[in-house]
């Protein structure tokens, strides 16, 4: 009955539209009250969930992304991507995906990618003759690459939960992220050829060189982050601080598009975003602690293993569960609640933790573009000034492509583990 109270209040909160963090907190408090557990456990477990050193890197990476975005990065990234692929049939769609692949290496969050790239690309694509629903759909789909290609906030969360090195997690996401981006570009090209979308003239190697020179300092930030982590010179938290300082210097003194007077607002916005994530982490940790105390992880593992202990079948079941959960729950909350129980199940059938962590994050990123709680869908539909339904229809081919990549990564572990194994 105690668990029924917990899950019932949680589901009710989601149905009536409460924020996920509040829903987690209210359902956990209801469980504690009904079970007679002192409510002092709530702040204790919240603090324990947030008191993880590596989580301090999240505010730093958010600040770095905001500084670079305000400092002129978006249009430089788009210009470089357009110079590379804009001349192909449906080139603005390919530019959209390529921009997200490059931009994701700076922000680490899908929503920031969707808002920043979408704010430029969706109006531009509509003006060039692309359908509004297609423009919004490809922007939403490509934004999910951001949290897979390093740096990645969800990967940091997974590292904190599992003890896996954040640097290893970042490397594990690189190949799947690039593969997902390339697969979406192929899908966009096929759609463009069939629907005879416009193409732009080739602008020449000189434009590629100029665009690369303009975007160099922005692109170098990803290299700085990866080098800092893999060289051992800095922890993820220290790397995030260095990235923030670098972002400020480049935006203010290299690109000269970051006015000093804008920095206080950027700091406040970044603090609010980081606080929202960490509050979610805290409440989700309480919820997760309750599930563990009720032995829900063991029950899940035992239930699945009672049906089958076949590795292929278990991977399929895990993917179906995470895809379903991703349709209704915010990514970070889902990771904190489900990662540990599903990791135990995965290890029981011989799945390596790094491999499992990679396809789990990939799964939940796809959830950002699936209704009814696909945040990136709402952002892009809002920019395109469309209702959600036509954008959902237009995104289906990209969802199918991303799910194919997901299953490729799930069943062929070297796509996730090969690169980390080369730099240990």
Image (cartoon, rainbow, N blue to C red):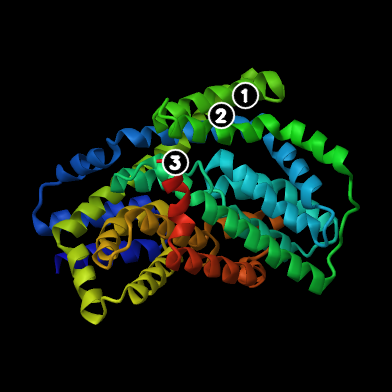
Q: Is mark 1 in CB contact (under 8 Å) with mark 2? A: yes
x, y percent for residue 416:
45, 55
**From the viewer's perspective, is 66 left or right of 204?**
left
Quadrant housing residue 8: bottom left
Quadrant housing residue 229: top left
Indicate the secondary structure of the residue bearing disc 3: loop
In three-dimensional space, the C-alpha distance between marks 1 and 2, rounded to whole angstroms, equals: 6 Å
x, y percent for residue 347:
27, 62
**From the viewer's perspective, is 98 left or right of 150?**
right
Q: Is residue 201 above or below residue 3?
A: above
- Check residue 266 in the rendering and tell me which mark sits there, or answer none: 2
Of labels 3 and 1, earlier in sequence is: 1
Q: Which residue position holds label 3?
A: 423
Q: Which residue position holds label 1?
A: 262
Quadrant position of the N terminus in the picture: bottom left
**From the viewer's perspective, is 280 left or right of 179?**
left
x, y percent for residue 281:
33, 45
């Amino acid at each position: 009955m105690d668990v029924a109270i917990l899950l019932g209040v949680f589901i009710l909160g989601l149905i009536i539209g409460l924020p996920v963090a509040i829903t987690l907190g209210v359902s956990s408090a209801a469980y504690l009250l009904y079970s007679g557990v002192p409510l002092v456990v709530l702040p204790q477990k919240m603090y324990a969930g947030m008191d993880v050193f590596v989580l301090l890197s999240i505010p730093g990476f958010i600040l770095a992304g905001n500084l670079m975005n305000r400092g002129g990065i978006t249009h430089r990234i788009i210009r470089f991507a357009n110079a590379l692929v804009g001349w192909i049939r449906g080139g603005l769609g390919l530019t959209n995906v390529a921009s997200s692949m490059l931009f994701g290496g700076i922000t680490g969050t899908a929503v920031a990618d969707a808002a920043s790239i979408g704010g430029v690309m969706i109006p531009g694509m509509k003006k060039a003759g692309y359908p509004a629903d297609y423009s919004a759909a490809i922007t939403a789909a490509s934004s999910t690459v951001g949290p897979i290609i390093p740096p990645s906030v969800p990967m940091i969360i997974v590292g904190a939960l599992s003890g896996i090195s954040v640097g290893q997690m970042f490397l594990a996401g690189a190949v799947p992220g690039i593969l997902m981006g390339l697969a979406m570009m192929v899908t966009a090209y096929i759609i463009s050829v069939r629907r005879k979308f416009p193409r732009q003239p080739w602008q020449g190697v000189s434009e590629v060189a100029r665009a690369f020179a303009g975007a160099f300092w922005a692109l170098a930030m990803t290299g700085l982050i990866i080098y800092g982590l893999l060289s051992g010179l800095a922890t993820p938290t220290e790397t995030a601080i260095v990235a923030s300082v670098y972002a400020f210097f480049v935006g203010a003194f290299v690109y000269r598009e970051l006015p000093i007077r804008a920095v206080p607002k950027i700091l406040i916005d970044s603090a609010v975003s980081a606080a929202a994530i960490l509050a979610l982490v805290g409440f989700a940790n309480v919820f997760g602690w309750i599930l563990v105390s009720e032995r829900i992880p063991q029950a899940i593992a035992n239930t699945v293993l009672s049906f089958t202990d076949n590795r292929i079948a278990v991977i399929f079941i895990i993917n179906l569960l995470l895809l379903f959960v991703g349709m209704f729950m915010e990514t970070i909350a889902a990771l904190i609640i489900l990662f540990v129980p599903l990791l135990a199940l995965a290890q029981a059938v011989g799945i390596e933790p790094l491999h499992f962590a990679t396809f789990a994050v990939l799964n939940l990123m796809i959830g950002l573009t699936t209704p009814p709680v696909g945040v990136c869908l709402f952002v892009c539909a809002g920019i395109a000034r469309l209702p959600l339904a036509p954008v959902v229809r237009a995104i289906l081919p990209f969802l199918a492509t991303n799910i194919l990549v997901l299953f490729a990564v799930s069943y062929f572990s070297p796509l996730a583990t090969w690169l980390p194994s080369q730099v240990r």
